[in-house]
Image (tube, helix red, strand yellow):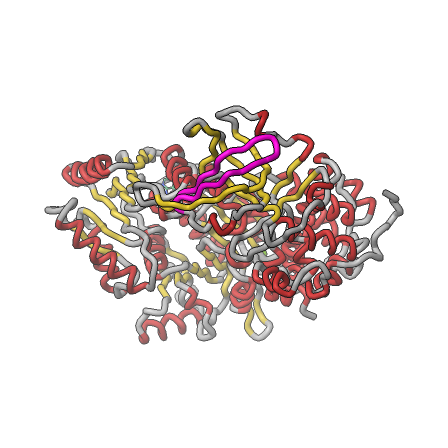
């Protein structure tokens, strides 16, 4: 390959490729073009970004002749016979004979009747599975299948020329074979010619990255297996780099027109016990019934350094369930209050907002601050709740108090973002939620800090209730500084978790509930996850609570909590449970976050396989809050291999960060990133659980470029790539004006 200093700056850009409709493909029929569109491929760029799932190295491919029983093998063969029937148990069974030119085997599928239509005689496909003996023959049962050439393709020969065959993802629904996709990709590659590379040679050398045209060619049509890794590395880098670039740009935009409030906080005050505290923060910390953990102290100092600093804080606080985030958040808010500003805490649900208010009130008890209206006088810290169920008169009073500054702290839901809410001086906004706080909402919050151009931007602290692996956090929250509470307060007893797989084990789990109740403690039972509207969820919870109190929990005092109950009803149930007037709380996932009753020592989760790892971990975190030993029982069968892995992971670990890694590995990035990342900003090749090093490089380069060129004016190709790949909301935010 020739290596000029900037060899490809003239080639086609991603925008060029995105502008070429697949209509222009000569090798694809109109029907196939529709099929491509149905799987989201409508431009040449989409096509080139449809990467092979794996490759077959024909030189090293196993022949049936050479394989032994018990071998796990990949067999490339042609279907020579197909039959369908029902087994004696009534399962649909499809049996194939597959011949690879050196021998033959039988392949069977159960309950996959559609295989008979997919794998017709003459179909060439790959079969991944274990060879087992069956009635004197060699058999693979339910192998993984990749169809290379279907009968419909009827293309002979071409597939055999290359030594390495790319296998493309395919769905039975679209009716596109791997071979067909490969053919279209080959045409696109050939006709696209050279591609523009936004990374110049110096950057590529520094990061050991392949040139783009080469990378795209080698990922689709490698000459040797060794070509694949460098190609994948380059293209995965590009994916991560674009995301990091977007994240860093977003941060520059926020910083560009930021007006910081320099809070009157002193990081050194945290952890300096002994000296007589005079500040509000100092007195609050000195009055806590417990010393801060080392992690809490460290994180608070990080927060105070930001709050006192010249730029508004954008910080993410991560901490496992029970690690003590609330105390940290409250101390930070008091840091704002002591300088005459206000603090707001926004929670995702009403239940959680109410819970937060309650815990904050307990922590604030007895704390006073100087009353400016009465010389030498003192007053309490004023805190209020604001949600959509707040009564009209209360709401009016709260809005007024916030506007005049008489109220110091407010806890609420998204209701806090509405126009009616204005602050005298919002100094710190704490957002407690699991999902990404949208760009739009951040702007809304920021606007609350400024009035008629006066005032400054509130500092922002985002708390996540679910730990996120560091790599994923760098992508999702890369524009936030990160603080981690990696230590639990002392005196907790670990939660023993057991997956009760059988009826018998489930019975003994309920027996444990009775034992704990007999010993004066309490339990939660989480209802099975049902699909449907909130009403459906609620009515099934009502039904389950009724059933349980007649059967497994007969004779116990059983309460019910679900999302459709009125605020007062919820309040009432929670108050009675906290007071010990109820033994068991049957609930939907509304208890997932925030509920804090130290006397509850058993958590029983019905049909646990339907919940995700993070959710199970959150639910489990409702127990183990006191000094008594706690138990968590996961009930029900696993419905898939993945579910088994999830439940076993929960049995094995109570470390939220370790579980988050398992989750990332199981589910991949797509689900963690949620609906926000879609289409072209997806990570197709990069894998966050594996590509740590590449992610760090991408971040480094993104920082370097945005440091020197915060608007990307000198990097027009990069700016253009972002426009092509980002979703509209992000692109509009980054490139407005
Ligand atoms: P998180 O919000 O991180 O799940 P919380 O803030 O609700 O955790 O804290 C869980 C419990 O631990 C609360 O009852 C809280 O009062 C208590 N707690 C917090 N920090 C400490 C500490 N340093 N020492 C002892 N207990 C603590
Ligand atoms: Mg500041």
Q: Main secondary structure of the magenta part?
A: strand
Residue 102 sits inside the magenta stretch = yes
Between 581 and 327, the residue placed more toward the observer is 581
Q: Is residue 621 visible?
A: no
Q: Quadrant of ligand 1?
A: top left
The front one of 432 and 339 is: 432
Report whether 484 appears left or right of 412. right
The quadrant the N terminus occupies is top right
Left or right of 584? Residue 119 is: right
Taking the view exactly as shown, the residue that stands out farthest to the left is: 555
Left or right of 646? Residue 241 is right
Q: Whole-percent x and y of residue 509?
A: 23, 38
Along the viewing direction, whichever of 495 and 331 lies nearer the viewer: 495
The answer to whether residue 268 is above or below residue 734 is above
Q: Quadrant of residue 229?
A: top right
- Span shown in magenta: 93-111
């Amino acid at each position: 390959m020739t290596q000029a200093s900037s060899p490809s700056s003239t080639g086609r850009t991603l925008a060029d490729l995105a502008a070429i409709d697949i209509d222009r493909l000569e090798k694809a029929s109109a029907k196939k073009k529709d099929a491509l569109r149905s799987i989201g491929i409508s431009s040449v760029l989409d096509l080139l970004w449809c990467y092979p799932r794996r490759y077959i190295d024909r030189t090293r491919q196993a022949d049936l002749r050479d394989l032994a029983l018990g071998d796990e093998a990949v067999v490339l063969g042609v279907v020579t016979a197909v039959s369908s029937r029902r087994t004696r148990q009534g399962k649909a069974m499809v049996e194939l004979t597959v011949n690879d030119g050196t021998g033959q085997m039988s392949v069977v599928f159960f309950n996959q009747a559609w295989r008979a239509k997919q794998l017709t005689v003459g179909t060439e496909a790959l079969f991944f599975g274990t060879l087992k003996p069956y009635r004197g023959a060699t058999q693979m049962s339910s192998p993984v299948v990749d169809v290379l050439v279907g009968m419909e393709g009827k293309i002979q020969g071409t597939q055999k020329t290359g030594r390495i065959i790319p296998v493309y993802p395919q769905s039975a629904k679209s009716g596109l074979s791997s071979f067909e996709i490969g053919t279209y990709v080959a045409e696109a590659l050939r006709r696209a010619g050279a591609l523009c590379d936004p990374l110049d040679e110096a950057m590529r050398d520094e990061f050991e990255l392949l040139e783009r045209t080469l990378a795209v060619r080698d990922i689709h049509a490698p000459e040797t297996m060794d070509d694949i890794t460098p190609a994948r590395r380059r293209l995965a880098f590009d994916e991560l780099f674009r995301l990091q670039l977007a994240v860093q740009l977003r941060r520059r935009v926020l910083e560009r027109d930021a007006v910081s409030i320099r809070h009157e906080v002193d990081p050194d005050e945290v952890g300096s016990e002994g000296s007589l505290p005079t500040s509000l923060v100092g007195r609050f910390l000195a009055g806590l019934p417990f010393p801060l953990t080392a992690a809490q102290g460290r994180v608070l100092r990080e927060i105070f350094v930001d709050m006192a600093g010249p730029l508004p804080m954008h910080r993410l606080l991560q901490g496992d369930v029970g690690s003590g985030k609330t105390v940290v958040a409250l101390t930070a808010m008091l840091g704002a209050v002591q300088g005459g500003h206000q603090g707001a805490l926004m929670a995702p649900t009403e239940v959680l907002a109410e819970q937060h208010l309650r815990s904050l009130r307990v922590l604030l008890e007895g704390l006073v601050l100087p009353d400016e209206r009465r010389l030498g006088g003192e007053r309490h810290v004023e805190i209020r709740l604001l949600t959509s169920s707040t009564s009209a008169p209360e709401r009016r009073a709260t809005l007024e108090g916030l506007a005049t500054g008489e109220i110091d702290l407010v806890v609420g839901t998204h209701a806090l973002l509405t126009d009616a809410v204005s602050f005298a001086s919002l100094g710190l906004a704490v957002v407690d939620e699991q999902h990404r706080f949208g760009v739009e909402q951040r702007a809304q919050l920021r606007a609350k800090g400024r009035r008629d151009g006066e005032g400054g931007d509130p500092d922002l602290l985002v708390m996540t209730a679910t730990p996120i692996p560091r790599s994923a956090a760098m992508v999702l929250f890369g524009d936030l500084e990160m603080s981690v509470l990696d230590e639990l307060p002392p005196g907790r007893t670990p939660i023993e978790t057991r997956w009760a797989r059988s009826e018998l084990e489930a019975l003994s789990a309920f027996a444990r509930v009775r034992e704990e109740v007999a010993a004066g403690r309490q339990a939660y039972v989480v209802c099975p996850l049902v699909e449907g509207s909130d009403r459906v969820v609620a009515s099934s919870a009502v039904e389950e609570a009724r059933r349980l109190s007649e059967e497994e929990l007969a004779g116990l005092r059983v309460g019910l909590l679900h999302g459709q109950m009125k605020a007062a009803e919820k309040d009432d149930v929670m108050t009675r449970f906290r007071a010990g007037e109820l033994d068991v709380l049957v609930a939907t996932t509304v208890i997932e976050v925030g509920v804090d009753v130290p006397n509850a020592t058993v958590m029983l989760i019905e049909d646990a396989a339907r919940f995700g790892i993070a959710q199970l971990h959150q639910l489990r975190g409702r127990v183990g809050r006191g000094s008594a030993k706690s138990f968590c029982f996961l009930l029900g069968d696993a419905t898939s291999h993945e579910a088994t892995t999830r439940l076993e992971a929960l049995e094995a670990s109570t470390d939220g960060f370790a579980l988050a890694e398992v989750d990332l590995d199981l589910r991949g990035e797509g689900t963690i990133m949620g609906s926000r990342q879609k289409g072209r900003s997806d990570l197709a090749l990069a894998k966050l659980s594996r590509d740590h090093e590449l992610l760090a490089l991408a971040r480094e380069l993104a920082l370097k470029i945005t440091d020197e060129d915060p608007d990307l004016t000198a990097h027009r190709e990069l700016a253009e790539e972002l426009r092509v790949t980002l979703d509209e909301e992000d692109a509009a935010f980054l490139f407005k004006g």
